[in-house]
Image (tube, grey):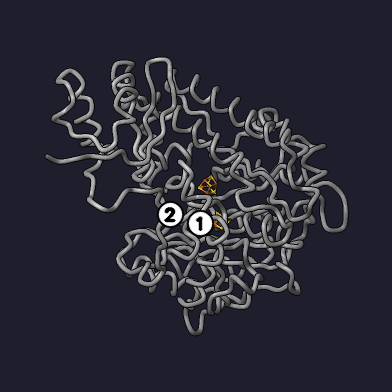
Amino acid sequence: MQAYTWADHRLFPTQEGALLFGVDHASLFALDSRARDTLGRWRSADPLALEDVPEEARGVLEELRDAQVLVPLVPHRRPRPAAVPELDPAGVPLETLVLEVAQTCNLRCSYCYAHGGTYGGTPRLLDPETARRAARTLLERSGDRRGVTLVLFGGEPLLNFPAVRAAVEEAEAAASAAGKELTLSLTTNGTLFTPEILAFLRDHRVLVSVSIDGPPELHDRNRPYSGGGGTYGDVTAGLAALAQWGIPAAARVTLAPRQWDRIPEVFDHLLGLGVREVGIAPASPVTPELLPTADQEEDLLRGFRTLAERFETEARQGRCLPFANLLDLLGRLHAGRAKGAPCGAGYGYLALDADGRYFLCHRLAGEEDFAAGDLETGPDLEKLRSALRAAAAPRRELCAHCWARRLCAGGCHYENHLRENLLGRAPGDSCRFIRPWLELGLRLYARLRAEPENPVMQRIARRQEC
Ligand code: SF4
Ligand code: SF4
């Protein structure tokens, strides 16, 4: 007789019954009240033999077995909370390369994590020849991947248009020779467009993200020019120019904790400027003043929840509210992949700085603990391994007991580095926001997927490939 035990799972009550989340496979099942009650009755039976279960309850338990929530008991080995598995970057082909094209900037944003674009060094530019080599390297190291992404980043990348042009043209030639799909993206402060640049971005189908933080008074406080003076007027003129040239732009917002109570207002302001999508990033705590209080974390969650409610209302009418954070989360949940790492950093995703050195990710450029080789010698696997291991170590135990571990896998390395290593916060400082946000996404996704024909659901399904 086969004995079964319960795999790690979590129940979220709903009006109809409950959502059952299988932790290790990041699987999600909607239970009606009968299934929920059956589960409630048998949950404490461990080990459990299905033959002992009365017929009227057995069907539900068999379905849970098929869903790997009830798993065969292996003698002498009791299941225990599993750590997020340690992945090895060896052999993972490169998928995304972020080029720090210009480590300098004409703005001085109040929350900048890159020290005014330089990442702590002297202001410098990537030379066009190195940009070309980097672009070729992305394709050469992409193995059997069908698609690759080149991200033009800074500082402000448009301070170095010759390198942008060189990297894009080389990547296109190499991708075409290799028969691969190439995605090009550029994140800019939106103040430096010229007709030549706009024509280039349009002709090469570069996906453009413009950093803009909301209404003039808020934006100008966050994002002044290096010489002083607000940038709102020039950035909105930049957005208008992009629209004129037929280039759809996404808005990338960064808000300090004291501004988190203005999230819906900021979102609406940016939609009113005609952007195709709005993504909202909480500012990283690069200084202790940017560490949020518990009330500010509540503001953040409340703001995101308000937008999620509006998203659902719109979705019921077949319309998509372009809130990028939520679309990304729903896309990930739809893909249904259990995470083995918080993000791609080190696993197919790398940044290259203006000196041709690799770093785990663009935000960690200049941090020696996260440096990993250079363009000349290639990514240093040993350094990647040790950086990833060191980054995960403080939260390994904490995450092993967390229901969200295969959706979150430890959180952003950079955020953790700031909070734990530089500001001395306890590991898991970000979890108070991460878990409720993931739960919100799970609940919304479970409701939306009941309408697979809804165009919003179809857009979410396509998003998983991003
Ligand atoms: S929410 Fe916190 S404890 Fe849970 S997996 Fe993420 S970092 Fe780890
Ligand atoms: S470490 Fe953080 S900033 Fe860097 S790629 Fe990962 S999630 Fe993004």
Classify 122 as above or below 17: below
Classify 12 as above or below 114: above
Determine the residue located farthest toward the right in the rendered image. 228
Question: Which residue is the site of mark 2?
Answer: 84
How far across and down, in percent of the image, does residue 79 sit? 33, 48
Q: Amino acid at mark 1?
A: Arg
Residue at disc 2, secondary structure: loop
Q: Residues within 10 Å of mark 2 (few under 14, many from 20)?
A: many
Q: Amino acid at mark 2?
A: Val
How far across and down, in percent of the image, does residue 7 sit? 32, 41
Residue at 49 percent across and 33 percent down: it is: 439
Quadrant in which the N terminus is drawn: top left
Could you tell me how many numbered marks the image carries? 2
Residue at 71 percent across and 58 percent down: it is: 113
- Note whether ligand 1 is within 8 Å of mark 2: yes
- Note whether ligand 1 is within 8 Å of mark 1: no
Camera-nearest residue between 386 and 219: 386
**CA separation, marks 2 and 1?**
7 Å
Camera-nearest residue between 6 and 96: 6
How far across and down, in percent of the image, does residue 258 sit? 78, 38
Q: Earlier in the sequence, mark 2 or mark 1?
A: 2
Classify 186 as above or below 378: above
Q: Is residue 319 left or right of residue 229?
A: left
Residue at 72 percent across and 31 percent down: it is: 262
**CB within 8 Å, label 2 to label 1:** yes
Looking at the image, in which quadrant does ligand 2 appear?
Answer: bottom right
How far across and down, in percent of the image, does residue 29 sit? 33, 30
Q: Examine the rendering and report whether any part of residue 99 can be seen.
A: yes
Classify residue 129 by image quadrant: bottom right
Residue at disc 1, secondary structure: helix
Question: Which residue is the site of mark 1?
Answer: 396
